[in-house]
Structure formats: structure tokens, C-alpha cells
Image: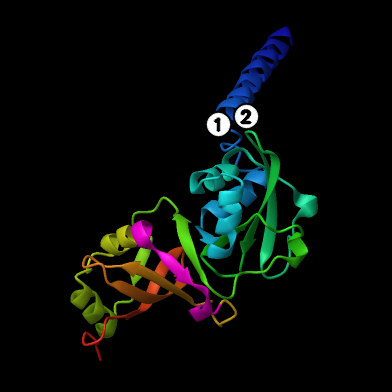
């Protein structure tokens, strides 16, 4: 019996040390079963978008885009302040910002959409909606080299050929470098899947548009908008 208690004691000591490492060295990111980390992971599984309308606040508080993504590392999810049902769901995450104090950041997630919008000029999650006009920067992408998946139709393949972007990884690279979303041309209420209109610059510096849906955790490009004279039938 003493042997069993001794083993349990050693197990408890080891387990406690493990928790300390998780909490203090990994900011709880290893505890995927925790409700707060499930929320953060669901946000990080999407593309983070900063609407142009929020850039004034970004400059006002002296924050960088990197600061916004760091909120998801060690910020605290305020479940009581969040809107956990509805479309969009809105999660409020609070983080201590050096020389600024505690700040609240609102992450809105539209149903069946690959994007998570960041707002920090909002005051109430229930009144927070997805942006409908203007543009937004794509500031974070999930760690997936095969995130982009263009349709395999003859039309889309032809468009890729004219763009010189046959490899989907090159499209992802372009989106990471210059990607933006046009909210006015996106339709998040569309069925069966919300439609997003993304913009990026090709190798010649020309702006290219594309229609994108979220399918099996991939950015499924269904059509490109090519420069005049390069259309595919």
C-alpha cells in the first residue's frame, strides 16, 4: 500500500511540474482541452483580417499587426463578454499591453467563413458585426503550406496559366505578401458557403481579384478576375 501511495505522490509531483511548464513556458497553448484555448485555436485556424476602419485605432494605441496576433498567445478569453451563439460569433480577449494597460480585442467569426476579423474600437460583442464595406488586410494565415486550393476546372486552370501561378503555393505566397479583402464584393450570407473576394498583386505588380470559399479548411478559389485582354472562357 505504501508503494502505491509513493507512486501516486511521484506522479502528482511530475504532473504538477508539467503543468507549470505548460502554463508559464507555453502560455497554456499545450492545453487544447481548455475552453479558452479551444476558442483561440478556432481563431488561429482562420485567416486574421484587420479592416481598414480599425487602422486608425491601431496607430492611436501604437500597436503593430504582430501585437494583434500575440493577443491569441497569452490573452484572456472573456466568455461572459463574448457572443458565443449567432452569426457572427464574437469572442472578446483581454490582454495587458505595455504602457497601455488592459485592452479588449473583439474577434468576429462568421459561420462557414475562413476569416476572423479583429476589432478593438468596439465596446459590446453583441453589437459587433462583420465589416460590409471597404477593405481589410490579411495579417495572419494558418500554418498550412497547402492552404490554397484552386478549382480544377478548365476555366480556372486557364486563368492560373495566364497569371503564371500554376503552383497554389505561389498564390498563397502572393496573398501573404499583398493580400486584401474587398468587403463590398464579399457575400458572407451566401449559401451554401459564404463568398469572399480577395485581392493580391501578381509578379508584374498587377492587382488580381479572386472569389474564394472555405472548403475542408482550404481556401478554395473558384474564379479569378484577370486584367483586360486575358480572359478565359
Quarter assignment of residue 146: bottom left
Would you say residue 185 sits in the magenta stretch?
yes
Residue 24 % position (x, y): 60, 26
Report helix, strand or loop for mark 1: loop
Residue 147 % position (x, y): 38, 60
Residue located 52% across and 60% down the image: 49
Q: Quadrant of the N terminus?
A: top right
Viewer-side residue, 3 vs 91: 91
Horizontally, residue 13 falls left or right of residue 161, namely: right
Residue 164 % position (x, y): 19, 70
Report helix, strand or loop for mark 2: helix
Viewer-side residue, 227 vs 115: 227
Q: Is residue 199 above or below residue 79?
A: below
Horizontally, residue 138 falls left or right of residue 131, namely: left
The numbered disc on residue 23 is 2
Question: Separation of disc 2 and disc 1 at Cα?
Answer: 6 Å
Quarter assignment of residue 154: bottom left
Q: Which residue is mark 1?
A: 26
Viewer-side residue, 131 vs 77: 131
Residue located 74% across and 48% down the image: 78
Q: Are marks 2 and 1 in contact (CB under 8 Å)?
A: yes
Q: Residues within 10 Å of mark 1 (few under 14, many from 20)?
A: some
Viewer-side residue, 109 vs 207: 207
Magenta segment, which residues?
A: 175-187
Residue located 39% across and 70% down the image: 199
Residue 119 % position (x, y): 63, 58
Residue located 25% across and 91% down the image: 233
Amino acid at each position: 500500500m505504501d508503494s502505491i501511495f509513493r507512486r501516486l505522490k511521484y506522479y502528482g509531483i511530475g504532473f504538477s511540474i508539467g503543468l507549470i511548464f505548460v502554463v508559464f513556458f507555453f502560455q497554456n497553448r499545450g492545453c487544447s482541452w481548455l475552453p479558452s484555448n479551444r476558442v483561440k485555436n478556432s481563431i488561429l485556424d482562420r485567416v486574421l483580417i484587420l479592416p481598414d476602419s480599425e487602422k486608425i485605432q491601431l496607430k492611436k494605441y501604437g500597436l503593430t499587426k504582430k501585437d494583434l496576433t500575440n493577443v491569441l498567445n497569452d490573452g484572456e478569453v472573456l466568455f461572459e463578454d463574448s457572443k458565443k451563439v449567432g452569426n457572427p460569433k464574437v469572442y472578446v480577449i483581454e490582454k495587458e499591453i505595455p504602457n497601455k494597460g488592459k485592452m479588449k480585442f473583439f474577434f468576429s467569426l462568421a459561420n462557414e467563413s475562413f476569416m476572423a476579423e479583429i476589432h478593438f474600437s468596439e465596446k459590446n460583442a453583441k453589437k459587433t458585426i462583420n465589416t460590409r464595406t471597404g477593405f481589410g488586410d490579411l495579417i495572419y494565415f494558418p500554418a498550412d503550406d497547402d492552404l490554397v486550393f484552386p478549382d480544377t476546372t478548365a476555366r480556372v486552370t486557364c486563368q492560373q496559366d495566364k497569371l503564371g501561378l500554376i503552383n497554389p503555393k505561389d498564390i498563397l505566397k502572393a496573398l501573404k505578401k499583398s493580400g486584401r479583402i474587398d468587403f463590398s464584393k464579399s457575400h458572407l450570407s451566401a449559401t451554401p458557403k459564404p463568398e469572399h473576394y480577395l485581392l493580391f498583386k501578381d509578379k508584374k505588380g498587377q492587382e488580381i481579384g479572386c472569389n474564394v470559399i472555405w472548403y475542408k479548411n482550404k481556401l478554395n478559389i473558384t474564379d479569378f478576375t484577370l486584367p483586360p485582354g486575358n480572359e478565359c472562357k
